[in-house]
Image: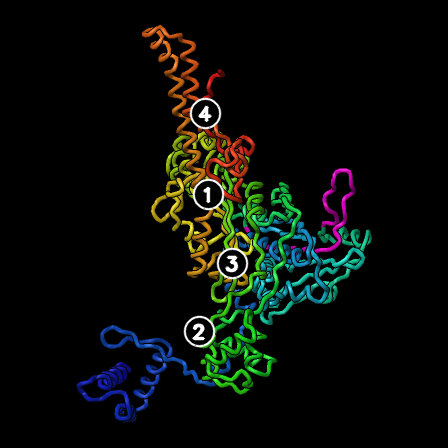
Amino acid sequence: MASCFSAGEEMRRNDNDPENGQESGATGGETELTATSDAGPELSEAVDLLDEDESDAPTAKAGGRSREPKRKKVTAESMAAKQRDISVSEFFAKNRHLLGFDNPRKALLTTVKEAVDNSLDACEEAGILPEIWVHIETVGTNRFKVGVQDNGPGIVRKQIPLIFGKLLYGSKFHRLRMSRGQQGIGISAAGMYGKLTTGKPVKIISKISPKKPAHYYEVEIDTKQNRPEIHNGRGEGVDIPPGNAGLEYMQTNGIEWVSHYDAVEGKHAAEVASGTRVTIELEGRYQRGRGSVDDYLEQTAIANPHVTLHYVDPEGNAMTYRRSTQRLPAEPKEIKPHPYGVELGHLVTMLKDTQASTLAQFLATSFSRVSPGVAQKICREAKLSGRASVRKIGRSEVERLYEAIQQTKIPAPITDCLSPIGEDLILKGLHSVVPGEFYAAATRPPAVYRGNPFLVEVGLAYGGQSTATRIPLDSLAELISETDARTLRQFLVNTFDGIGADAADRIIKQAGFGSRQSPTKLKRKEIEHLHEAMRNVNVADNQTMQVLRYANRVPLQFQQAGCAITQAVMRTNWRSYGLTQPRGGLPSGPITVMVHMASVWVPFTSESKEAVASYPEIERELRLALQAVGRKFGMYMRRRLKVRQEGERRSIFLRYLGEVATAVSKINGTDRDHLYADLLKVAKTKTAQADVKLDERGRPLGEEEEGEDYGANVLIVEPQEDEAMPVAKQPELPLD
């Protein structure tokens, strides 16, 4: 048997030996067959055994390399049999990070954000002053139940499953007008995430009238079909009767619903006549600080001063942000697309879908700012007849038409499709939430990018204490217990707005901790030392500017570094306005800047809507708006500096006036008291700037025409009124 194997191996060596001139092919095959048949049945059996072993596992080649296993042959037919449609729900279920559900903490915030945005849009579109209830309840370890209710118009029965149980379904995608939601993904994606992480369906109750039944559904998304599956009412949902019978039914079945507004003093609580409540159970993580649900709701109150927000956090703490105005924002109007914003492929599609019969009619009825006269100009530029049938226009003619549109001067789009916050409401919103002593706001005129109208608004607040200096001891201990920061420095920088690395280091040094101290290992006494250091260390000088970014009144919480708004703030020269600023960084100081971009189509960098993309037109408007509030702030800082300098001069005068009067009196015999009184008058005249008080517009009190005027949209607040950052008290002159 051994000789048979030796013969088989010899034949293989010969087959693979290039010196023998035999390679795998017809000749090698014939030689092997002949040798096998001559050697008898024993050799044939041995060769078969070797072939079997080679098919099961790779064998060693010359030089120690292994032979590749045989690949299964795939045909075009077998590949075609595996092809199938991919549902959009199935795609986003596997790529949920694209929608903002990439970690538990962010998922909780995104769920609340999408529900609140939908509620605000619904209320404003119906002309109702929004009142929103947000309730987050802990139901297990890292599991929360999020309930968001509004007092909007409600949703008709047949639309409820589609809105909450189907991706890319909505009323806002195909219209050009300012709104918070755009794509028809957000709230249904939040429900899909809840289903994936907890297995629980989304619960929706909607009421359109106090006299009509409310509709209650438990819905989930069938991700393979991208369609809703209804769990209750045998797949039809449940109608809840109005009145007390309906309230009893809800209580019996555990259906959550806020039935009445808060009672006003001396009046009975009014019933919530209509609205929608969505409840989603999901896996998440609740943590206070920057990028939290609490932070998002606070910023929402700033940009939406017409909203009342009731918030109950997972620990049962209740917080209400009351509206500061009874005036709804102006309703934006829907517009047609502007010709400059239409690409060639879209133009081809529009020509196919139009009901117009002639080319001139198509241009005049399908686009914004295209009159019949402008339509004829475009046709002449393209060397096409305005009476040409749109059905007979070929590809080359469409390309000429597209080029002619770009060459023809067309007025900018109308801007009544936008609804800015307005300077006065920005000032009210900032003043109600952000402590400070100086506030300024500016709204730029509307501009256009890629044919889409947009405008930029900026608000600025200066002064006030950092949140780190005002936090209670118990809240600090709670934040420390929840943090996942590895060092105390990282905890301070990431949790408190405005605290930079330098301020964090000074707080840590004051508290007597090391640079690598872990916050979670601090004992109660050590937390008290940290709290005392946070209150005593002056972080204002090295406090980093806080940037609040908004798009269509919605706060943007993540991807700050990749956002055009942050980049524009960093490129602004704040040193010329009296602040210190490192190269390529944010300036230092107790200052908050709010930037709002309003547009019919905000160019987000991703589907999760976390950062605004950079376009030259957007960058220019951001720069000009920031410079507008910067100039007003610079005037205030210069005036403040002058007051401080005059106060320092006065203190020097007061220090030596008595000695000067006494010395002069001894030299020439002048009455010392009379001389001292005269010197006081001179000091008062020379340092009069130290006594200047400013009104709410920033003008010196008692001066009608003199002094610098900050212009409109400026608010000056006495530091004592707003618990702002304390300023050094100026020395007072003795009475005459």
Mark 3 residue crowding within 10 angstroms, few (<14) / some (14–19) / many (20+): some
SS category of the residue bearing label 1: helix
The single residue placed furthest to the left in the displayed view is: 19
Q: Quadrant of the N terminus?
A: bottom left
Q: Which circle marks residue 730 in the picture?
A: 4
Residue under the image location 74 percent in, 64 percent down? 233
Side of 81 where 323 appears, left or right: right
Q: Are marks 1 and 3 in contact (CB under 8 Å)?
A: no
Q: Are marks 2 and 4 in contact (CB under 8 Å)?
A: no
Distance between the Cα atoms at labels 1 and 3? 21 Å
Tell me the amino acid under the disc marked 1: Lys
Distance between the Cα atoms at labels 2 and 3? 22 Å
Sequence-first tag of 4 and 1: 1
Sequence-first tag of 1 and 3: 3
Q: How many marks?
A: 4
Tell me the amino acid under the disc marked 2: Gln
Q: Is residue 322 magenta?
A: no
SS category of the residue bearing label 2: helix
SS category of the residue bearing label 4: loop
Magenta-drawn stretch, dominant element (helix, strand or loop)? loop
Sequence-first tag of 2 and 4: 2
Q: Quadrant of residue 643?
A: top left
Tell me the amino acid under the disc marked 4: Gln
Sequence-first tag of 4 and 3: 3
Q: Position of residue 101 (x, y in %)?
A: 52, 57
Side of 285 where 50 appears, left or right: left
Residue under the image location 58 percent in, 41 percent down? 432
